[in-house]
């Protein structure tokens, strides 16, 4: 005779432990479309992806942006930047450095595609559809050392100890090998980032469509 049972509650939830990077908010920090004079450019479309992340007030802010350059038949430049705000877990299902480079990008990519489609729908040439990409492959092309988050942790030992449980051994080693920057120097580098939702440095990869 078949029997049924109630779903089991994970032990982490019973203990009140946050065991995932919960998305708190996703928003656009930049949306722009610009029609260029002089006719359409030649060649294929070049799509540039931008990635960055930063820790702020017990949350993780991850930026993922795209720029589509003009190409044959479309003399417009399109740019969109989405920011995801995630909570920091007590236990890491995946290391923080892997999450910001892969999982967060996978989360933000549908929002980015929809933003570009909606934005260009009102443009002269109609909607632009961004093809799907392999987030893991894309993440390998980014340099984590060029992000605000890496610089934060390299400059602030207190913050580094606070999130040490979430970092992979490889990332921790990379931080230890990084020359220490003062918080003043870090502030100079991220002034623009505070204006753009905590993401200043551009870590970009270009792909032809």
Image (tube, grey):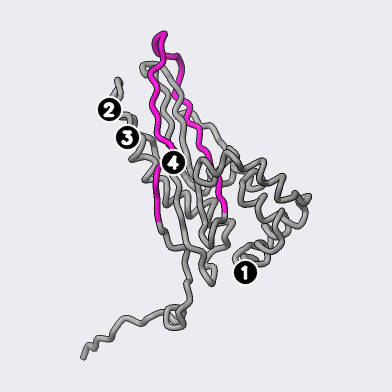
Label placed on residue 165: 1
| Label 3 crowd bin: few (<14), some (14–19), many (20+), radius 10 Å | some
SS class of the residue under badge 4? strand
Tag 2's secondary structure? loop
Q: Quadrant of the N terminus?
A: bottom left
Q: Label 2 belongs to which residue?
A: 122
Q: Which residue is drawn at 45% across and 51% down?
A: 84
SS state under label 3: helix
Q: Residue 117 carries which label?
A: 3
Tell me, yes or no, whether the two marked residues, 1 and 2, touch with CB atoms within 8 Å: no
Examine the structure image and report whether residue 205 is included in the region drawn in magenta.
Answer: no
Q: Secondary structure under badge 1?
A: helix
| Residue 191 percent location from the top left of the image | 60, 41
- In terms of sequence position, does the residue under pointer 1 or pointer 4 come before the other? 4
| Distance from the alpha carbon under mark 3 to that under mark 1 | 39 Å
Reading the image, the residue beneath label 4 is: 29
Image location of residue 138, percent across then percent down? 53, 43
């Amino acid at each position: 005779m078949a029997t049924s049972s109630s779903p089991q509650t994970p032990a982490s939830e019973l203990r009140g432990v946050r065991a995932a990077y919960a998305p708190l908010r996703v928003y656009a920090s930049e949306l722009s479309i610009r029609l260029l004079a002089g006719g359409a450019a030649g060649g294929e479309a070049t799509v540039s992806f931008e990635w960055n992340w930063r820790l702020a007030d017990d949350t993780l802010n991850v930026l993922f942006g795209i720029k589509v350059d003009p190409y044959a038949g479309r003399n417009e430049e399109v740019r969109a930047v989405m920011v995801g705000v995630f909570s920091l877990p007590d236990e890491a299902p995946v290391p923080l450095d892997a999450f910001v480079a892969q999982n967060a990008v996978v989360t933000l990519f549908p929002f980015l595609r929809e933003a570009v489609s909606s934005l260009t729908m009102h443009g002269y040439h109609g909607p632009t559809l961004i093809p799907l990409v392999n987030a893991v492959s894309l993440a390998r092309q980014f340099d984590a050392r060029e992000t605000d988050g890496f610089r934060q942790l390299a400059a602030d030992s207190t913050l580094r100890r606070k999130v040490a449980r979430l970092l992979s051994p490889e990332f921790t080693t990379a931080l230890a090998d990084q020359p220490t920057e003062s918080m003043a120097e870090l502030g100079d580098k991220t002034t623009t980032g505070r204006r753009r939702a905590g993401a200043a440095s551009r870590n970009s990869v270009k792909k032809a469509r």
